[in-house]
Amino acid sequence: MTFREKVIDLLNEGLQEKPSIFLIDLTITDAFKIIVTLDGDNGVVLQDCIDVSRSIEHNLDREEQDFSLEVASVGVGSPLKLVRQYKKNIGRMLIVKLAETTIEAELVDANDEFITLAWEAREPKKLGKGKETVQKRQEIPYTDIKEAIVTVIF
């Protein structure tokens, strides 16, 4: 079993004990630096990172292979990568970059194929001069999304 396979097995065991926590990214560098990025349905607390770190670190032998380990939660401005992340952020504002445009809107729904965004826009009136506020709603397949980031509103 390779070093990477051992780390993946230990990581999966650690995550099985915490079903609300899920893996976003795992990187193992040539210098055996293990970087684990986590997210959770209800967020990630420090204890979650400690528990996952221990499940990996305490079951690897530094005599066999020296390594360093970093376990962290996904950052606030990090792009969404998984459908599960979109589902947990329903009701929040997103900045979604598509091939031709960027939309800032509320995420109102997310399923396994697409997300639904809703926002208000000012458009020219159909009759007469001036503009009117209209409600927009758009379904966007995940395959069309180049990047989506949750906006933090203070």
Image: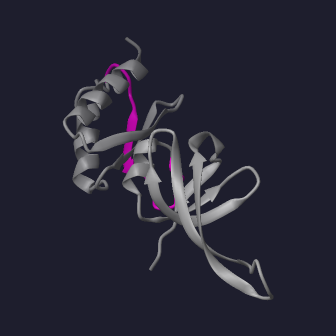
Q: Is residue 65 magenta?
A: yes
Q: Position of residue 146 (x, y in %)?
A: 65, 47
- Residue 104 part of the magenta-drawn span: no
Residue in view at x 37 percent, y 11 percent: 1
Q: Main secondary structure of the magenta part?
A: loop
> Is 84 situated left or right of 137 in this image?
left
What is the magenta range? 63-80
Seen in the picture, residue 57 relative to 48 is either above or below; the reply is above
Q: Nearer the viewer, residue 71 or 65?
A: 71
Q: Is residue 100 left or right of residue 41?
A: right
Of 31 and 34, the residue lying toward us = 34
Residue 8 location (% of width, % of height): 36, 25
Q: Is residue 122 left or right of residue 14?
A: right
Q: Residue at x 26, y 44 (%)?
A: 20
Identify the image quadrant of residue 26: top left
Quadrant of the rendered image containing residue 97: bottom right
